[in-house]
Amino acid sequence: MKMKYQLAAASMACIGMAVVDSPSACAQSNITLYGWTDAGIEYLSNADGKHSAVRLQNYGILPSEFGLTGTEDLGGGLKALFTLQQGFNLNDGTSTVPGYAFFRGAYVGLSGSFGTVTLGRQFSVLFDKTLFYDPFLYASYSGQGVLIPLEGNFIDNAIKYKSPVVAGFNGEALVSTSGIAGNTRAGRVLEAGGEYVGASLGVSAVYHQQHGTVAAGVDMSAQQTTIGTLAVRYAFDPVTVYLGGERQTGDLEPVKTVYWAGARYQITAAVALAGGVWHTQSHVASVGHPTLFVLSTTYAFSRRTTVYLNLGYARNSGSSSQTVYEYDPTPLNGASQRGAMLGISHVF
C-alpha cells in the first residue's frame, strides 16, 4: 500500500514560485513514496563455474527498490509528473549499482490528451514492451536477462513519448544521445514500439538501436546493436500463454536469435503457477545454443506480501554460459546450471 503525502502551498511548491514568480507555482502536488523488498535463500550449482553455493540472494520476483513519484494538475487535462527510483540489495544494503543516486529512474515530464513525454533516465521501450510478454514479469529467474542487454534496460539522457490508447493500440518512442560535442552518434539510442491490448489478446513489436560510446579516448560510436522483438500473449482465463521471438545483430553484442514460450496459471486468488522456456541460437561460440527452463509458484498472503519458489535449469553445451539468475556474469564454459530460490516479497 502506498503512502501519500500532500505538500502544502506554503512548502516546496512556493519555493518554486519565488523563482518563476507565478501564483500557479503554489498549486498542491501529490507525492507517493513506494517500493518493495524481496530476498530469498538460493541454491545454485556451478555458482563459480565449478562449485555449488547456498546464499541469501537479493530478489526473486521483484527487485528491491524504493521511489518517489508525483503529479500536479495543471488544468485543462494537463499534468506535470516526476519519478525518482533507486534499487538496492536487501541482503547487504548496498546500491544495486554503485555511483547512482537513482539507478532505476530519474525523470520529469508532462501528460495529457496527447500522451506522455518524459525526460531523464528511464526504462527503455524494449523493456516496456517485452516485460508483460514474459510469464515471470520482472523476476530474477526469467527471460529478461536473455532478451534485454544489461545496458538496454535503462537509458540515460532519454526523451520518451508514450501515446494515448486508441481502440486498444498504443505506441512508444525514445531517443537519447551522450551529448558529446562533434559526435551526435556516441551513445545514441533510437527506439520505437507498438502494442495492441484487447480483452484477451496482446501483441507487441519493438525496434531498438543502440550505438557505442566514447570513453578513455576510445571511440566505439560507429558500432551498434540492433534488436527486433515480436511477442504475443493470450488469456484463457485463468491461464495466460506467451510466445515471442527476438533477433539481435550488430557489433556491440553477439548476434543471436531467441525464441520463447510460457504460461501462467492463476490457480486461486492467492496461488499462481508459471513456467517458461527460452532457447537461444547463435554462431558465436560463447553464446552457442543454450536453453533456459524456469518454473515458479507464488502464494499471496495479502495484496502486499507474497512468498515464492523459483526453480531454474540452464542447459549449456560447447562454450555457452547461460545462467539461471539474470545477468550473472559467471563463465560456465558449457556447464549446465540448476537453481532454486525460496523467498518473500513485500510491497509498500
Image: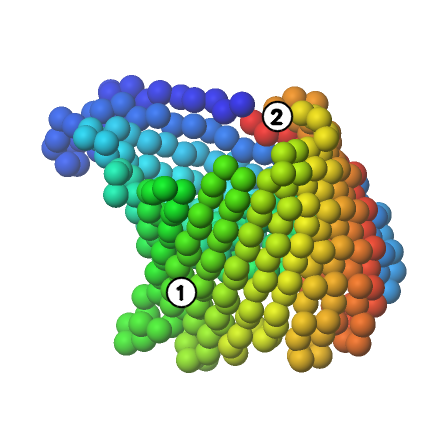
The secondary element bearing badge 1 is classed as strand
Residue under label 1, please give it.
Answer: 189
Instruction: Give, as a three-letter code, the residue at label 2.
Output: Arg
Q: Residues within 10 Å of mark 1 (few under 14, many from 20)?
A: many
Residue under label 2, please give it.
Answer: 304
34 to the left or right of 91: left
Q: Which residue lies furthest to the right in this view?
A: 51
| Quadrant of the image containing the C terminus | top right
Q: x%, y% of residue 8?
A: 29, 19
Q: x%, y% of residue 212?
A: 45, 73
The secondary element bearing badge 2 is classed as loop
User: What's the CA distance linking mark 1 and mark 2?
Assistant: 36 Å
217 to the left or right of 56: left
Q: x%, y% of residue 211?
A: 43, 72
* Residue at 80% from the left image edge and 63% from the top image edge: 315
Q: x%, y% of residue 265?
A: 70, 37
* Residue at 50% from the left image edge and 30% from the top image edge: 34
* Residue at 34% from the left image edge and 43% from the top image edge: 166
Q: Residues within 10 Å of mark 2 (few under 14, many from 20)?
A: few
Task: Give the quarter of the image for residue 144.
Answer: bottom right
| Quadrant of the image containing the N terminus | top right
Question: Looking at the image, which is closer to me, 84 or 202?
Answer: 202
Against 25, residue 106 (above or below) is below
40 to the left or right of 173: right
* Residue at 48% from the left image edge and 70% from the top image edge: 226
Instruction: Give, as a three-letter code, the residue at label 1.
Output: Val
- Residue 142 seen in render: yes
189 to the left or right of 144: left
Task: Give the quarter of the image for residue 110.
Answer: top left
- Residue 217 seen in render: no
